[in-house]
Image (spheres, rainbow, N blue to C red):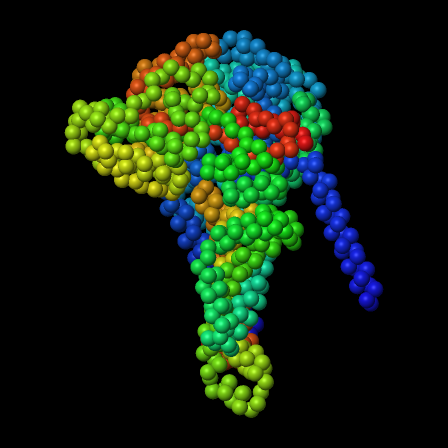
Amino acid sequence: MKSLKNMWAVVLVLVTILALGSGVVAAKDTIIIAQGADAKTLDPYNTTDAPAGRVMSVIFDTLLTRDDDGNVAPGLAESWEIVDDTTYIFHLRKGVKFHNGEEFKASDVAFSFAQIAKSPHAVSVRATIDFENSRVIDDYTFEMKMTEPFGPILNHLGHQVMSIVNEKAYTEAGEAVGQNPVGTGPYKFVSWATGDRIDLVANEEYWGTKPSIKNLVYRNIPESASRTIEVETGGIDISIDIQPSELKRLEANKNVKVFRREASTISFLGFNASKAPFDNPKVRQAINMAINRDAIYNVVFQRVGTMATAPMSRVVWAYNDALVPYEYNIEKAKALLAEAGFPNGLELTISCDQNQERLDTAEMAQAMLSQIGIKVNIETLERGAYIDKVIGGELEMFGLGWASDTGDPDYALFALFHSSMHGAGGNMGFYTNEKVDELLEIGRSSTDAEVRRNAYLEAQALIWEDVPYIFLHCPENVVVYNAKIQGFGVYDDGQLKVENFHF
Amino acid sequence: MIRYIGKRLLMMVPVLLGVIVIVFTIMYLTPGDPARMMLGAGAPASAVEELRETLGLNDSYFVQLLRYIKNVVFRFDLGQSYASNKPVINEILERFPKTILLATLSVTISVIVGISMGIISATKQYSIFDKIATSIALLGVSMPTFWAGLMAVIIFSVHLRWLPASGSYGWEYWILPSLTLGLSSSATIMRMTRSSLLEVIRQDYIRTARAKGQNERVVIIYHALKNAMIPVITVIGMRFGALLGGSVLIESVFAISGLGKFIIDSISMRDNPVVQGGVLLLALSFSICNLLVDILYGFLDPRIKSQYSISRKRGWRRNAQAQ
C-alpha cells in the first residue's frame, strides 16, 4: 500500500515536470497577445468592434491594403485598373488557398460582396458600390461598379468589414459563422474559449510572408493594470491598449519594448450648433480662445499623443499642416464674447460619458471658462444614454472622439462636418457651412488625388476657422511587447504585422 | 419535506416570470438604442434602422415582451446575443462553470476560515487573539477586493513569482482569486459566528451541559455551534448566491471569463437578450440557494423542521377540504 502511494507520488512529480517542461518548450513558438476585451464575433460582416478586428485582421485578407506610407497597396487583388469613375477591375492573385483548402476565386469576391451589401455594419464603408452590377469576369478578374463616383473607395476596400470570406465555408457554417472564420490570412482559427482566449495557428500556405511563429493566442484581460503586470512578468508577449499613466514605468523596463504611433483619431469638445448661442461662431471662437490646450495636453493626456493642429489627425493623408494654431488669450476671448452679445458671460453644460479623460477635460475647461465669466455645469451620462443625446442634439457641449478607420480624409471629415450628416450621421455638432459641404463633396466624388487633396486642404482651413469643435488631441496607439520579439511592426491601419514576428 | 421542496420549486415559477417582466421592462425603458450601440455613434441612421428591424426592436413593447416570454416558456429559448449572434444560453453556459468554481472555492475558504476564527474569538472573548482576529476581520470587510487582488498579484506573481497573475488554465490559477475573494468574505462570517456564538454560550442549556461535566470542546461544537449556525448559514447562503452572479472586480483583475463581467458589459452594450437571460439564471440560482439554506435550517433546528411538516399537513388538510 505504501509503495503504491510512493509510486503515485513519483508519477505526480513526473507529470508536473512534464507539464512544466512542455510549457517552456511551447512558449518559444507561441505569441500571446492580450487585449482589453474579447472579440464579440469573428464574422467580419457582423461587427466593427476593435478586439474582433484585431483577430480578424490575421485571419482574413482584403482585396487591397495600405503600405507604410498609407498608399493603397495590393492585397488579394494583385493589380487593379480604374476604367472610369464608376468602374474598377481587379486582377486577383492566383493560387491563394483558403484555410479550408478551397482555392480563392472571383466567385468568393462576389459572394463576400453580397454579404457586405446586406451588412448594416458596412453602410459607411461600402459607400456607393453598385452591388447589383458588379460582376465576375473570369475566375481571377472581378469588375466593381459604383452607382456614383467615390474617390476614396480603394482605401475603403482595405477595411475590416470588406474582408473576403470563402463562399463554401461561410454558407456551411450557417448560424455559427461567427465562431468558424475561414479566410486566407497568415493565421488559421483553431479554437475559442468564450470570453477568455482565441487560439490561432500559422497558415503554412499563406500567399504573403509566411509567419514564423507557429501559435498565436489572443487573450482577454480586461484590467489594464493586469495586462501590464502580465507583459512585465512574461505571462503574455504583447499588450494592447496601454494607459498613458503606465507608459513611464514600462519604458524604463528592459524586458519590454514600447511601440508608440500616432493614431488616426482626434478627440474634441463639441459644440451643438443647433442650439443657441452655439450657432454663433463668435461664441464658439471665444470659448475656444479661453481654453488652454497646452494645460489639457499636459495634465489630461500626459503629453502622450499630439496636440490637435487641424480638424483631423496628422496621419490621415491631405492633412493640412499650415493652419495657424489657436491663440490662448483670456482678454481677447472676453472681448469676443461681449461682441457676440454676452458681456456678462453665460452658463452652459458640458456633458460626457464615464470616460475619465473626457471628464478630466471637462473639469479643466470648467475652471478655464470661469475666467471669461462662463459658468460651466458638468454632467456625466451612461454611455448609451449619452450617445442618444449627442446624436439627438439635446446637449450643449460634449466630449467625443472620431477615428478615420480607412486613413482617408473622407472618413475623417465627411461624416463629421457635412451638413447632410447632422446628428446620427456623424455630424454631432450640427455644423453647417455650404462651402465646406461643396469641398467635401468634391473630395468624395473625384478620383483625382490632386483635386481631392486641394479640396481637403481648403475644407480643413474653413473648419478650423469656424471652430465647430474645440479640437484637443490626437492619441497614440501604444503597444507593449516582449523585448525578445524581433521584427515587430504595425500596419498603417494599426494592426500588428504578426507574420514578421520571430524570437 | 419533499412536498415542501416541491412547493418551493413551484413558487419559483411566478418569481422567475416576475424577473423576466421586470428586467425586460427596465432594459426597454433604459435610454440607449441597442442597434446604435452595436454600430457606433457615427453609423448612418439608415444602418441603425436596418439593424433595429432585423433585431425586432421596432415592434411594440408588448409584442416584444410576449415574444420573449413565449420563447422562454415554450421553447426554453433565451434568444440570441445582439453582439455575437450566438444563442444566449451558450454564451451563459460557457461562462457559468468558472463562476460556480470560483464561488464554491471562495465560499469554502471563507467558511473554513470564518467559522474557525469566529469560534476561537468567541470562546476566548477579549483575549489577544480575539482582538487580533476582530481587527483582521474589520480590515477584511473594509478592504476593497479589487485592491486586495491587485496587491496579491504584485506580491505573489510579480515579486515572488509563485503564482500566475491572470487567466484560468489550471488549478494554480485559481489560488489567488479564490483566496482574495474567500478571505474578504470570511470576515463577515467570522463576525457573524462570533456574535451568534457569544449569545448562545450564555444560554441555560450550555450551563447545564457544562454542569454535567461535558468536555468544553463538545459543549462548543455540539451544543453551542449547532444552535449558533442559523444566522451564519443565512450569511453564507446569501454570499454564495451573490457570488454565483459573478464577481465583477475579481473577474476583471484575474481575467477570469465568468458571468459577472459579461453581464455588466452586456448592460452597457445594451445586449438585452444576454442581460435578460443572465439575470434570469441569477434569479434561478439565487432561489435555489435560498431553498438549500431553508432545508439546512431544518437539519440544524428540529423546530423549523417540524414547521415544514406542519405546513405540509395544513396544506394537505386544505386540499382535503377542497375535495
Q: Please state the horizontal and vertical placement of residue A329, each as a whole percent of the image.
A: 26, 25
| Residue lying at 59% horizontally and 59% vertically, measured from the top left | B105
The answer to whether A488 is drawn above or below residue B228 in the figure is above
Q: Position of residue A211 (x, y in %)?
A: 68, 28
Between B310 and B229, the one lying in front of the other is B229
Q: Position of residue B179 (x, y in %)?
A: 56, 58
Vertical arrangement, residue B66 with respect to residue A71, above or below = below
Q: Position of residue A173 (x, y in %)?
A: 63, 36
Q: Does residue B14 show up?
A: no
Kindly tell me whether residue A281 is visible in this rendering: yes
* Quadrant that contains the N terminus of chain B: bottom right
Residue displayed at 50% across by 62% down: B185
Give the total number of marks visible in the rendering.
Answer: 0
Question: Against A74, is A426 above or below?
Answer: below
Residue at image location 59% in from the left, 48% down from the top: B159
The image quadrant that residue A98 belongs to is: top right
